[in-house]
Image: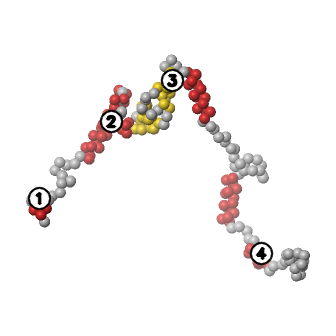
Amino acid sequence: GPPSSQADCWCPSEPLTFPSGILQSVVMAPSTEIQEAREKMKARFEAVRTGGKGSARRTKRSKHVSHVADDKQLQAQLKRLGVNSIPGIEEVNMFTESGTVIHFSAPKVQASVSANTYVISGHSENKRLEELLPGIINQLGPDNLMNLKRIAEGYAASAGSKAPNPGEDEDIPDIGENFEDVSNK
């Protein structure tokens, strides 16, 4: 019937009927591709569920680990050992067996000779021995002699392959017979 003055919407008294093909085309079964994709997602997210069916899908939350507490414990142990700060050290180089160097620039160095404890803290970089040459030569010991020979052979090989022929002067152009004649043109 027509809308009444009391209600804002119109509601039919009888259920609506549609021709047979309309509702089937609107509400249809998903295609096989969509069904396969849904099955894959279902299988993939089954492992995430913590409880049974209907429970929340949450993984275990890891606690945030603060390294401040570790640093405080370390400082307390160092204080107990009686380490003293050593000022004026510009750099520290630690040579590894693999031939790399752990390089500290302006580190904080602390030592306790009685406890045989040395602490080097600060920003470190892993560098190759070649990167620190030639300033590091006076720090090299006999155990790094083989690494130094290997580096020298590498430099000699690269310099030998890049050596120009003595007959070729690429940076001097041919001007002609007389320079003054060419400049007067």
* The image quarter in which residue 137 lies: top left
Horizontally, is 121 left or right of 164 in the view? right
Residue extending furthest toward the bottom: 2
The x, y position of residue 68, in whole percent, is 60, 35
Precedes in sequence: disc 2 or disc 1: 2
Of badges 2 and 1, the one in the foreground is 1
Precedes in sequence: disc 4 or disc 1: 4
Residue at 20%, 53% in the rendered image: 171
Task: Find numbered disc 2 in the image and state the secondary structure of the residue it sits on.
Answer: loop
Q: On the rendered image, what quadrant is the C terminus found in? A: bottom left
Precedes in sequence: disc 3 or disc 2: 3
Of badges 3 and 4, the one in the foreground is 3
Q: Nearer the viewer, residue 110 or 145?
A: 110
Which mark is on residue 134? Answer: 2
Residue extending furthest toward the top: 114
Distance between mark 2 and mark 1 Cα atoms:
44 Å
* The image quarter in which residue 75 lies: top right
Distance between mark 3 and mark 1 Cα atoms:
73 Å
Which residue carries the number 1 mark?
A: 179
Q: On the rendered image, what quadrant is the N terminus found in? A: bottom right
Horizontally, is 33 left or right of 173 in the view? right
Asked whether residue 80 appears in the rendered view, the answer is yes
Which residue carries the number 3 mark?
A: 84
